[in-house]
């Protein structure tokens, strides 16, 4: 070290602090991109055949893309029996009684990890001075009926930098919401491959597509005088597998990919499962990301299928990931199979209690609609939540079932 210091003579021109910072960020982004390419070679990618995507070769060989519609004749009578009396005003179906924050307190930006539940699978993630939206849905989703309004109005959102979309189904890709966000904030939309065409029809051009195991490394820009004092930090977003399907029109089944997402920033790692059936990809993701602080896991419908995990399989997938905090999503917002909107959460509480030993050092975090929570405070506590009912009281009608 002494020789190195002595070699710098007087009058030598040294790189500025800004130049050194830029070189370090460039090196970090290059390493992350190369890691991604290596990961793609090690992991399973979606099967692409005849212009359509499939979760695996086995699924391509054993199922038809039209199999997703074969259950409609069985589900339609149940749907009519539940929704027709409601529509005619003969028998109103219950609304979700889960509480909403009266006055949402959402900061403009945050360095530490903050999560805000809007509704359904819609989350605002604030980390490293960046604002990220997941599957934002503020509008309606026919033929599904809303059982709970969003936790707050779209106008109350802080400026959004990035929007992540898991797939193109209407309860995750809401045209009205996305157009409004594009007009207001002009964020970057990060999409699974094949979805940019749909976004172009909405007039949204600022988007990028990713295949599974591809990353987007976003280097912070210099702060302007009008921006918040919160410095933006290096952000890495990875597109990851999910076992689902896509369809926006009758004939475009699986022509666009679906995904889950991993967000890494400022020492925190957040996994967003999107919509997914259970599969080996959860263990793959857990091996590739040894530390996952938070996993946003869907818990509805109650009964698992090849395309959706219910509460029981959601816990299994959570353990496969090796994540620390379980956050239930995809419930309480739209009418589906259950007459009681809180039923997925009730089932989750039951299965969580049954698997007490496996979940001893894990935590389950529940949000009110519109509620913001600091994840750093929760990670630093030692209170493992083994019984959801003891953490936040379930609705009164839950105890009568």
Image (spheres, rainbow, N blue to C red):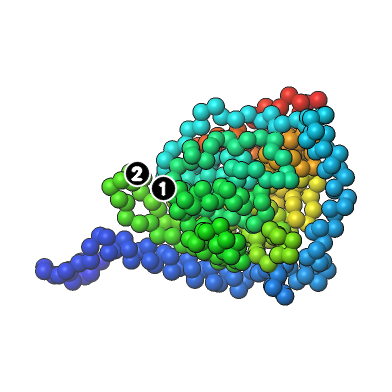
Tag 1 secondary structure: loop
Q: Is residue 165 visible?
A: yes
* Residue under numbered circle 1: 129
Across and down, in percent, residue 286 comes to 63, 57
Q: Residue shown at 48%/57% (left/top)?
A: 188
In depth, the one of 170 and 324 nearer the eye is 170
Q: How many marks?
A: 2
Mark 1 Cα shell of 10 Å, populated few (<14), some (14-19), many (≥20): many
Where, quadrant-wise, is the C terminus in this rendering?
Answer: top right
In depth, the one of 76 and 348 nearer the eye is 76
Q: Residue shown at 64%/57% (left/top)?
A: 167
Across and down, in percent, residue 9 comes to 13, 70
Q: Is residue 284 left or right of residue 76?
A: left
Mark 2 Cα shell of 10 Å, populated few (<14), some (14-19), many (≥20): few
In depth, the one of 279 and 355 nearer the eye is 279
Q: Residue shown at 74%/46% (left/top)?
A: 143
Classify residue 253 by image quadrant. bottom right
Q: Is residue 196 above or below residue 366?
A: below
Tag 2 secondary structure: loop
* Residue under numbered circle 2: 228
Q: Residue shown at 75%/55% (left/top)?
A: 307
Distance from disc 2 to disc 1, alpha carbons, whole Å, reads 9 Å
Q: Give the label, 2 or 1, closer to the camera.
A: 2
Q: Answer whether labels 2 and 1 touch (C-beta < 8 Å).
A: yes
Across and down, in percent, residue 28 comes to 41, 64
């Amino acid at each position: 070290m002494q020789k190195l210091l002595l070699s710098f003579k007087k009058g030598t021109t040294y790189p500025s602090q800004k130049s050194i910072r830029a070189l370090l960020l460039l090196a970090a982004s290059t390493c992350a991109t190369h890691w991604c390419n290596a990961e793609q070679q090690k992991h399973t990618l979606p099967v692409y055949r005849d212009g359509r995507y499939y979760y695996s070769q086995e699924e391509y060989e054993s199922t038809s893309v039209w199999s997703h519609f074969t259950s409609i004749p069985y589900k339609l009578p149940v749907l009519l029996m539940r929704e027709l009396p409601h529509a005619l005003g003969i028998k109103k179906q219950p609304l979700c009684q889960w509480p909403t924050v009266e006055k949402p307190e959402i900061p403009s930006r945050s360095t530490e990890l903050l999560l805000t539940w809007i509704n359904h699978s819609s989350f605002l993630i604030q980390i490293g001075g960046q604002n990220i939206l997941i599957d934002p849905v503020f509008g309606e989703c026919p033929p599904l009926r809303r059982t709970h309004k969003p936790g707050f109005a779209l106008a109350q959102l802080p400026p959004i930098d990035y929007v992540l979309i898991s797939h193109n189904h209407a309860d995750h890709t809401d045209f009205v919401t996305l157009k409004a966000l594009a007009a207001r904030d002009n964020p970057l939309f990060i999409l699974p491959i094949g979805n940019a065409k749909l976004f172009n029809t909405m007039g949204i051009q600022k988007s990028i597509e990713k295949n599974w195991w591809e990353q987007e490394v976003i280097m912070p820009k210099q702060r302007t005088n009008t921006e918040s004092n919160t410095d933006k930090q290096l952000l890495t977003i990875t597109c990851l597998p999910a076992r689902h399907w896509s369809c926006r029109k009758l004939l475009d089944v699986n022509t666009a990919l679906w995904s889950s997402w991993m967000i890494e920033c400022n020492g925190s790692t957040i996994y967003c499962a999107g919509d997914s059936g259970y599969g080996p990809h959860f263990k793959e993701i857990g091996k590739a990301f040894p530390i996952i602080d938070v996993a946003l896991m869907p818990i509805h419908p109650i009964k698992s299928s090849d395309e959706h995990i219910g509460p029981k399989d959601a816990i299994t997938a959570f353990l496969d990931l090796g994540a620390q905090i379980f956050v239930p999503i995809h419930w309480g917002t739209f009418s589906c199979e259950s007459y009681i909107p809180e039923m997925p959460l009730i089932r989750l509480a039951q299965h969580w209690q049954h698997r007490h030993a496996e979940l001893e050092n894990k935590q389950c975090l529940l949000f009110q609609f519109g509620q913001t929570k600091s994840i750093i405070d929760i990670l630093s506590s030692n209170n493992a939540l083994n019984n959801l009912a003891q953490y936040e009281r379930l609705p009164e009608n839950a105890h009568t079932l």
